[in-house]
Amino acid sequence: MTRFKWLVVLALVAVAFGTILAGEDCHGKKCSMSTQACLDAMATKMHDSGYVGVMLNHDESEGTLSIESVIPGTPADAAGLKAGDVLVALNGTRISKDNEAALEKARGDWRPGQKVTYTIQRGGLEQQVTLALASMPADMLARMIGQHMLEHASVAVAKK
């Protein structure tokens, strides 16, 4: 079973770099922007993006996206999301490969204070959970930018 972990900025942030930098040539491939241009774009876009506060697990074999853990004190925690919840839809749009573009656009438009509604599956039943997005915590922002900047450094070293 193949597992990928994401941090949601928009919830669903792992998709974070692709979602946040969509249109900046960073989606689905190595970032082609200069290090400084990428740093500036990430700092601006991520700072102004809404934050949910979950770690996600994408099970490609089953096509499911489930919550692996909920970060304490985040909008996800306040809304009652729990580890093991399966994310079925976001604001009425089913979470699937067929709806990937629409979901990425929706996540890219998230702002702190905005309300979003997830349809989740818990214990075999579907239910809706609404939460208000928060600003991304500074330590999380720094960590995500730092990880991406390390990718830039490794690409720069490989080119030499």
Image (tube, helix red, strand yellow):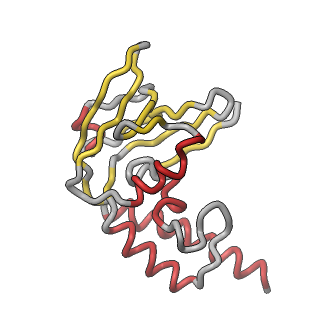
> Camera-side residue: 3 or 113?
113
In this view, 157 is above or below 107: below
- The residue that appears at 24% across and 58% down in the rendered structure is 112
x and y percentages locating residue 14 in the rendered image: 51, 52
Q: In which quarter of the image is the C terminus?
A: bottom right
> Camera-side residue: 89 or 134?
89
x and y percentages locating residue 123 in the rendered image: 41, 14
Q: Residue furthest top?
A: 124
Q: How many labels does the image show?
A: 0
Q: Quadrant of the N terminus?
A: top right
x and y percentages locating residue 90 in the rendered image: 39, 39
Q: Decide if residue 14 is on the left or right side of residue 73.
A: right
> Camera-side residue: 155 or 90?
90
- The residue that appears at 42% across and 26% down in the rendered structure is 85
Q: Decide if residue 4 is on the left or right side of residue 76.
A: right
- The residue that appears at 39% across and 48% down in the rendered structure is 11
Q: Decide if residue 137 is on the left or right side of residue 56.
A: left
Q: Decide if residue 155 is on the left or right side of residue 73.
A: right
Task: Report which quarter residue 109 is drawn in.
Answer: bottom left
x and y percentages locating residue 61 in the rendered image: 68, 29
- The residue that appears at 37% across and 36% down in the rendered structure is 92
